[in-house]
Image: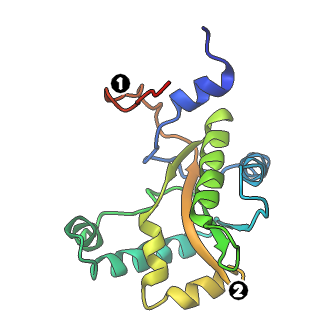
Amino acid sequence: MTLNETLKIIKHRRSVRSFKDEQIKDEELHLVLEAGLYAPNAGDQAWHFTVIQNKELLERLNLAAKEAAKQMDIEGLRELGNNEKFNCLYGAPTLIIVSGNEQSPVPLDADCAAANQNLLLAAESIGLGSCWIFFVMLAFYSPQGSELRKELKIPEGYKPYCSAVFGYKKAEVVNAEERKPNLITYIR
């Protein structure tokens, strides 16, 4: 069986952690966001997308996340928080945060994750690099967390669940390694 374009994109997409300084085009951003809006959800599309392209604000988010990481019980996160060279956004020019309405009757982490995945696949389909970013979510648990939510205009009652960065790839990404064996069980 030959792979169609969708399956090729899924298999080819890799996390990119090295971006050119150039901002992505508005047309590309629109296509990525539109794909996010069409993600599967539990029926009420209870998400909100926040697009950040301001370099100063991106750096403040990075620093706030690192400050929160320094207080975490997880050693690896503390190490990243204390690493002066680490930038959790990898210098990408665009960050999209996916927040969910906390009043929704269904768990939103899955809906927001599905939307985030659509953003990543759409980016790959048009030649953009992307990377799912958990670390920056720590910024909302920092002392600046409430202030950042207001500044980012995250709607009242919405919680940031996931995010991804986007930009032009500095280099082509290598092929994916083979998947681990024994990850699928069939019961027929």
Q: Residue at x 53, y 70 (%)?
A: 58
Read off the residue under disc 2: 156
Read off the residue under disc 1: 178
Q: Residue at x 66, y 71 (%)?
A: 100
Tell me the element at label 1. loop
> In the rendered image, is residue 140 in sight?
yes
The number of callouts visible is 2
Q: Nearer the viewer, residue 120 or 178?
A: 178
Other residues around mark 1 within 10 Å, as few (<14) / some (14–19) / many (≥20): few
Q: Position of residue 60 (x, y in %)?
A: 48, 78
Q: Is residue 161 above or below residue 28?
A: below
Residue 84, by quadrant, is bottom left
Q: Position of residue 180 (x, y in %)?
A: 32, 29
Q: Residue at x 62, y 60 (%)?
A: 112
Q: Amino acid at mark 2?
A: Glu
Residue 47 is left or right of residue 160, and the answer is right
